[in-house]
Amino acid sequence: MNKNSICAEVIKQKLKTEYIGKDFYFFEKTTSTFDEAEKISKKNGTVILAKAQTNGRGRLGRQWESNKGGIYFSVILKPEFSGDNLHIITPLCAVAIERAISKYTPCKIKWPNDIVSDSGKKLCGILSKLQTDKNGDCYINVGIGINANNENFDKSLKYASSIKLVSGSEINENELLCSCLFELEKCCNFKNTDIIMKEYKEKCLTLKSRVKIISIKHNKTTTGLCMDITPEGALVVKKDDGETICVNSGEVSVRGIYGEDYV
Ligand code: BTN
């Protein structure tokens, strides 16, 4: 057994969190951690981890390639609910995961939820879903896929890479996961949201960049300059025709002006 590979026992020993990961489910292979979440009792901080997924899901209805070497997990969060919690949770998680990955290789956040390497390769994606359990209680399932030690990606994924490929060394998946869970607990307590959102903006390469916004629903493309990110995590864009618009992450795919993407 490779000492760098995911091992549930090692994770339990190393984990320094108070509540995230105290309830921990581990699968060698599953369809998706989103599917497993449906079947369990959902306590705040429950973690569902898989070494591989056969039907991993990404944003905007895309598939998430989930081969060996990656870290695929869901964290169940049950914050005091306000409508804003779901929008804000993704940027808070992005900051947490950026902090953890940057211990291995320099990286940045691409709005809304990607962690990309200095060379623009996608290392991680985050997808948060607001769900209701059978008692009618709401919870958020934050699904996180990290390309840790993956070595092969489908040819169609032009901008996908892994931490191992960009840094040149194999990384310890257990240490990285523990660090992610530790940072998630610090960032997702909703006590210092303003400070974390400031950090998000500092680390977000989309801010002050020219962007092409592709609305999947309306099959429409707009170009402009990203002026700001609202406290709720929406993108404020000054379009080339002078109009300023606000876009939410559920609606659009954002690319650099030359059309490059990181998926
Ligand atoms: C994205 O499109 O960038 C988001 C990708 C999210 C992938 C993770 S892997 C764990 C969880 N289970 C899934 O099926 N998807 C998310």
Image (spheres, rainbow, N blue to C red):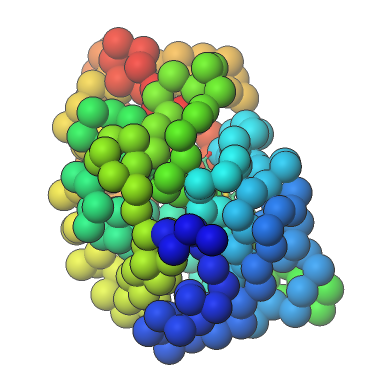
Specify the quadrant of the image occupied by residue 130: bottom right
Q: Residue 72 at x, y = what percent?
A: 56, 54
Q: Residue at x 63, y 58 (%)?
A: 50
Q: Is residue 142 visible?
A: no
Residue farthest toward the front in the current orientation of the protein: 1
Q: Residue at x 57, y 45 (%)?
A: 68
Q: Is residue 92 left or right of residue 99?
A: right
Residue 27 appears left or right of 111: right
Residue 163 picture location, percent across and down: 34, 43
**Residue 174 at least partly seen:** yes
170 vs 11: above or below:
above
Q: Position of residue 92 (x, y in %)?
A: 36, 61
**Observer-nearest of 223 and 111:** 111
Q: Compared with residue 194, is residue 255 higher up or lower down, i.e. above or below?
A: above
Q: Nearer the viewer, residue 113 or 80?
A: 113
Is 124 left, or right, of 139 in this rendering?
left
Q: How many marks?
A: 0
Q: Residue furthest bottom?
A: 18
- In this view of the protein, which residue sits in the foreground, 242 or 179? 179
Q: Residue at x 23, y 21 (%)?
A: 210
- 191 to 59, vertically: above or below: below
Quadrant of residue 138 in the image?
bottom right
Residue beneath the point at 48% across and 75% down: 11
Q: In the rendered image, which quarter contains the N terminus?
A: bottom right
Residue 153 drawn at (x, y percent): 51, 28
